[in-house]
Amino acid sequence: GDSVTQMEGPVTLSEEACLTINCTYTATGYPSLFWYVQYPGEGLQLLLKATKADDKGSNKGFEATYRKETTSFHLEKGSVQVSDSAVYFCALSAAGNNRKLIWGLGTSLAVNP
Amino acid sequence: NAGVMQNPRHLVRRRGQEARLRCSPMKGHSHVYWYRQLPEEGLKFMVYLQKENIIDESGMPKERFSAEFPKEGPSILRIQQVVRGDSAAYFCASSPRGTQEVEQYFGPGTRLTVT
């Protein structure tokens, strides 16, 4: 079945460091790909998405490119801030799965001042 | 436009009691999804509903769990005879259409604790 694999955390960075969180997927067909963020004690917020190959999603300085050849959707940010400390989830949605979201396990990010 | 509303935010139940979790989707959204986040685990799909219809319940445990989304009112996730293993955060999401490229909007979650 469809699945998402994320790099394990926790990830600890200093402010202004570069961030990459790896995400790879397995899916039949052409899924849509998402990054959600969960701040402490809160629900999930959509960070960015991409719906077809080579699309780049971006928001709040974060970017991710849908790479079909490597089945990847890595999340990147050039300069993290303390306020970026959260758990980041990669997910996919596929028509063959009734559009439900299939999730990675999440990667916890802590940014120190 | 109000976001997805869930209540209660926190719910404590003793083993054997019933838990009822409510979800009001965003205005204009007729597709509702429920997910469960167990401690130290990722989110798992439970059920997908449209108004008065269960579309996909492949993630629901076979016993004690049920869900509905009536014509009027919120979607309800019901857990009968709760056990400690049901302690988790339950998230509801809604979307305006059931197509794969449309993102789902999440509520704040209900954190269920079974004592």
Image (cartoon, rainbow, N blue to C red):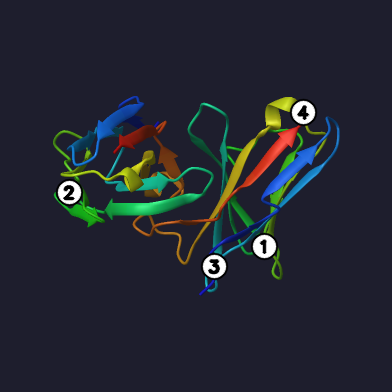
Q: Which residue is mark 4?
A: B83
Of marks 4 and 1, the one in the foreground: 4
Mark drawn on residue B34: none
Spatial CA distance of label 4 from label 2 is 44 Å
Disc 4 residue type? Val
Q: Earlier in the sequence, mark 4 or mark 1?
A: 1
- Name the foreground residue: A49 vs A20: A20
Q: Which residue is mark 3?
A: B26
Spatial CA distance of label 4 from label 1 is 28 Å
Q: Are marks 2 and 1 in contact (CB under 8 Å)?
A: no
Mark drawn on residue B52: 1
Mark drawn on residue A53: 2
Badge 2 crowding class, 10 Å Cα cut-off, few under 14, some 14 to 19, many 20 or more, is some
Disc 3 residue type? Met
Q: Compared with residue B41, is residue A89 higher up or lower down, i.e. above or below?
A: below
- Residue B52 is left or right of residue A35, and the answer is right
Spatial CA distance of label 3 from label 4 is 31 Å
Disc 2 residue type? Ala
Q: Compared with residue B30, is residue B84 higher up or lower down, i.e. above or below?
A: above
- Name the foreground residue: B28 vs B2: B2
Q: Earlier in the sequence, mark 3 or mark 1?
A: 3
| Position in image of residue A15 (x %, y %) | 24, 40
| Chain at tag 3 | B
Spatial CA distance of label 3 from label 1 is 17 Å
